[in-house]
Image: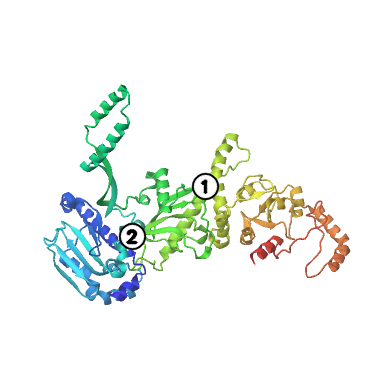
């Protein structure tokens, strides 16, 4: 048994998650039975569908009480005794036969995680169909005992008493259990209470000794004021009348009471039309532990082979360590199964470039391995990831469309409205633009979707960021390629001789100033059937030359053939591949360009700085 338990679980903290989950399932069952049998719930406290946790430090015991369906003697033996007595071989056989089987509860394995922290456990249980109350006890040593429980009546449900091991005494702290409930069971449907102390202030009567001391102090003060006027004495008469009321003082007192631990609501279970913006903002702040509202969010339910519900949020500001240890960082999504937290360290849910997105994914049908700690290798994960990526990109696209004026000749009122929305996407691009560029490099299947999210400055954009779609809309008639130039800064690019002829012909040129842009453009070769053309490379073509101009250019090359050949012999052959007559220059006598398939000068600069 020890071998099975310790091989299934790597984190001791999850014992509380498993027991609370089992208690919640039990409460769900009795609530379902009460739909057809109103008497199933009973009366008074028995009607309260809740889970209560209490610590006894003197005995080293944690007790967890639920008012669920409970278990009969036979059910105690079948549900909790299977592994302890004879189920080990059956459990292992089942694991070998089918990897997709969710074994939690079937063999009581979820319950047996309690032995990670306990050396002895007792379960007191009462079922409506059984007149007697029973107690199950075991040390997980291959033996267990079931006997009639003559202790405090439970009415209905179970109470688990966990006798902690010496090395697990940290779980006797209320703060520790609060932390675990907040992490793993925050969104359990039923209320979870813990018996805890708190300090309160209350008014109490002043005791006789204190009153005498106060009177002595007042007498000394009165002696100093014997020369006061008659008006003051009249005021003293008023005060003396007030002295007849009972005197009290404020004292701090420690009281013990049941404290609710899970007041957060699982809003993803509701329809998106029933949740307002304020609720989404409040939920995001609690989930992300942030004080700022999200830039955008999407709430959806996926149906089909794998059903799940999800809410995704985009933070307003990127984490300071967003690109530190980039390829080893897990996504910021939390995975729940039936509102029970499983993990927030899954690489399979979102690609690396979307790791800034926060939110939750909750599935009732997601297959899990026996410990709930590691997802089985299953095609459902790929399906979930595909849907999450599509929804995330749709959310970003909608935000981008809201910020895009779309029409350069729009009325001023429309422009004012659009500019306020545009600031929202500008914030996103400033914080997460690099992530979108990384996505173009890494995610070939969504490359075109991501390309539409790119924003950049151009030779005609002024202070406005432009999308590729806007660029294509503004292309000159007959223009066949999208021109761009990469460099250190926009100011440097505006003065580049590579652009002289392009600007003279009134072509719009995209300015790329981020080092990652060079890598991005190696993967993004075309957009909307238009090829990209780097203005710093030798294959630059304008596409507007007629036959006469082509003949003139050919004649010019022939006339200067001897001259270019001479330059070829003078210049070092290791550095210069060819010397050609160019039609890209206007005022600059010559420029050095890169060969068609070589690294651009800016790319070489980037590589040297990263070496």
Q: Most extreme residue toward the bottom, as rendered? A: 89
Q: Residue at point 29% right, 60% down?
A: 21
Q: Residue at point 62% right, 55% down?
A: 527
Using the image as rendered, state which of residue 286 and residue 449 is in the foreground. 286
Q: Which of the 4 image quarters holds residue 138? A: bottom left
Give the vertical position of 313 relative to 372 (above or below).
Answer: above
The answer to whether residue 223 is visible is yes
Residue 390 image label: none
Give the vertical position of 604 relative to 229 (above or below).
Answer: below
Name the secondary structure under disc 1: helix
- Pair 1/2: label in front: 2
Q: Which of the 4 image quarters holds residue 521? A: bottom right
In the picture provided, is 249 more to the left or to the right than 592? left
Q: Quadrant of the C terminus?
A: bottom right
Using the image as rendered, state which of residue 415 and residue 283 is in the foreground. 283
Say which label, 1 or 2, has the lower sequence index.
2
Q: Residue at point 86% right, 67% down?
A: 570
The answer to whether residue 28 is visible is no
Where in the figure is residue 225, as x and y percent of width and height?
A: 32, 29
Q: Quadrant of the N terminus?
A: bottom left
Using the image as rendered, state which of residue 555 and residue 20 is in the foreground. 20
Q: Which residue is label 2 attached to?
A: 176
**How far is the residue under mark 1 from the one under mark 2?**
41 Å
Q: Which residue is label 1 attached to?
A: 399
In the picture provided, is 574 more to the left or to the right than 164? right
In the picture provided, is 185 more to the left or to the right than 447? left
Q: How many marks?
A: 2
């Amino acid at each position: 048994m020890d071998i099975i338990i310790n091989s299934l679980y790597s984190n001791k903290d999850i014992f509380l998650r498993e027991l609370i989950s089992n208690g919640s399932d039990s409460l769900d069952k009795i609530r379902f039975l009460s739909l057809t049998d109103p008497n199933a719930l009973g009366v008074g406290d028995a009607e309260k569908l809740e889970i209560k946790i209490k610590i006894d430090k003197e005995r080293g015991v944690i007790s967890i009480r639920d008012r669920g369906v409970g278990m009969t003697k036979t059910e105690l033996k079948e549900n909790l005794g299977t592994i302890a007595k004879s189920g080990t071989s059956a459990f292992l056989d089942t694991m070998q036969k089918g990897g997709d089987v969710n074994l939690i509860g079937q063999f009581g394995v979820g319950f047996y995680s309690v032995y990670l922290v306990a050396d002895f456990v007792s379960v007191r249980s009462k079922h409506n169909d059984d007149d007697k109350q029973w107690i199950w006890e075991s040390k997980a040593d291959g033996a267990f005992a079931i006997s009639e429980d003559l202790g405090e009546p439970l009415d209905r449900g179970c109470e688990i008493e966990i006798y902690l091991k010496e090395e697990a005494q940290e779980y006797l702290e209320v703060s520790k259990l609060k932390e675990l409930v907040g992490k793993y069971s925050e969104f359990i449907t039923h209320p979870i209470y813990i018996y805890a102390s708190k300090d309160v202030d209350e008014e109490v009567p002043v005791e006789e000794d204190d009153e005498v001391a106060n009177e002595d102090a007042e007498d000394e003060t009165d002696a100093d004021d014997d020369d006061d006027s008659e008006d003051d004495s009249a005021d003293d008469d008023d005060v003396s009348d007030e002295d007849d009321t009972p005197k009290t003082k404020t004292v701090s007192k420690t009281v013990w009471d049941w404290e609710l631990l899970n007041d957060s609501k699982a809003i993803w279970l509701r329809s998106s039309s029933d949740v307002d913006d304020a609720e989404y903002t409040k939920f995001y702040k609690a989930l992300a532990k942030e004080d700022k509202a999200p830039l955008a969010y999407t709430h959806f339910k996926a149906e089909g082979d794998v059903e799940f519900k999800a809410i995704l949020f985009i933070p307003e500001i990127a984490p300071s360590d967003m690109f530190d240890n980039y390829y080893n960082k897990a996504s910021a999504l939390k995975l729940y199964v039936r509102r029970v937290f499983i993990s927030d360290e899954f690489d399979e849910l979102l690609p690396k470039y979307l790791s800034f997105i926060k939110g939750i994914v909750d599935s009732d049908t997601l297959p899990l391995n026996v410990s709930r700690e590691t997802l089985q290798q299953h095609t459902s994960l790929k399906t979930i990831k595909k849907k999450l990526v599509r929804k995330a990109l749709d959310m970003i696209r909608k935000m981008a469309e809201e910020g895009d004026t779309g029409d350069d000749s729009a009325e001023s009122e429309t422009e004012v409205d659009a500019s306020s929305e545009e600031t929202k996407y500008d914030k996103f691009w400033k914080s997460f633009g690099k992530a979108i560029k990384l996505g173009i490099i890494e995610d070939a299947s969504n490359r075109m979707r991501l390309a539409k999210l790119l924003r950049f400055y151009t030779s005609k954009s002024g202070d406005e960021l432009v999308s590729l779609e806007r660029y294509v809309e503004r292309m000159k008639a007959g223009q066949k390629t999208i021109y761009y130039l990469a460099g250190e800064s926009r100011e440097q690019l505006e003065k580049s001789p590579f652009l002289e002829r392009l600007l003279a012909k009134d072509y719009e040129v995209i300015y790329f100033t981020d080092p990652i842009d060079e890598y991005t453009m190696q993967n993004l070769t075309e957009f909307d059937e238009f090829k990209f053309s780097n203005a710093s490379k030798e294959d630059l073509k304008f596409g507007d030359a007629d036959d006469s101009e082509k003949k003139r250019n050919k004649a010019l090359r022939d006339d200067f053939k001897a001259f270019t050949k001479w330059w070829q012999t003078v210049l070092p052959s290791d550095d210069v591949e060819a010397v050609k007559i160019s039609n890209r220059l206007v005022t600059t006598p010559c420029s050095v360009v890169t060969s068609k398939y070589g690294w651009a000068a800016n790319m070489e600069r980037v590589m040297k700085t990263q070496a």
